[in-house]
Each structure stands twice: as C-alpha cells, then as structure tokens.
Image (cartoon, rainbow, N blue to C red):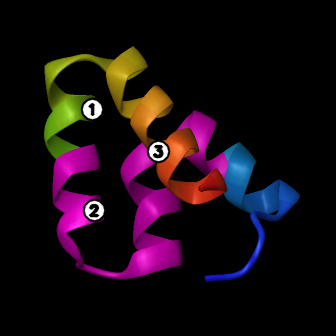
Amino acid sequence: MGAATFIDIILAILLPPLGVFFKYGCAVEFWICLVLTLLGYLPGIIYALWVIVK
C-alpha cells in the first residue's frame, strides 16, 4: 500500500475502524481494529495508526 496521508491519520484517531476500512476494506486488519476499539478506544487508535503507517 502507499504512504499514509493526513486524512488517513486523522480518521485513525477519530474513528479507528473507519480509517483502517478505507485503507484495507473488510480485511482482517479492519476486524482486529474494530474489536480493539470496542474493547478500549486507545488500543483501537494505536493499532489503527500502526497498521496505516506501516
């Protein structure tokens, strides 16, 4: 995938699963981010940023 844009990073902070969805679609990364966000907002943000920036 390409480099993360400013919009990708803002979406990852505000709505982590949505940011990952726009980057990867309904792949495994999205579902992991969704579960982490439901368990705790901060783990969802951290995972979303990590997945989008990697």
Circle 3: element type:
helix
Q: Earlier in the sequence, mark 1 or mark 3?
A: 1
The residue positioned 48% from the left and 53% from the top of the image is 51
The residue positioned 28% from the left and 46% from the top of the image is 33
Residue hosting label 1: 37
Residue hosting label 3: 48
Circle 1: element type:
helix
Tell which residue pokes out farthest to the front in this image.
54
Q: Earlier in the sequence, mark 2 or mark 3?
A: 2
**Whole-percent x and y of residue 21?**
40, 70
The residue positioned 53% from the left and 42% from the top of the image is 50
**Whole-percent x and y of residue 14?**
58, 37
In reply to whether residue 5 is colored magenta, the answer given is no
Of the 4 image quadrants, the one containing the N terminus is bottom right
7 left or right, relative to 44: right
State whether residue 17 is above or below residue 50.
below
Q: Earlier in the sequence, mark 1 or mark 2?
A: 2
Q: Residues within 10 Å of mark 2 (few under 14, many from 20)?
A: many
Q: Residues within 10 Å of mark 3 (few under 14, many from 20)?
A: many
Q: Main secondary structure of the magenta part?
A: helix
**Whole-percent x and y of residue 20?**
45, 61
Of the 4 image quadrants, the one containing the C terminus is bottom right
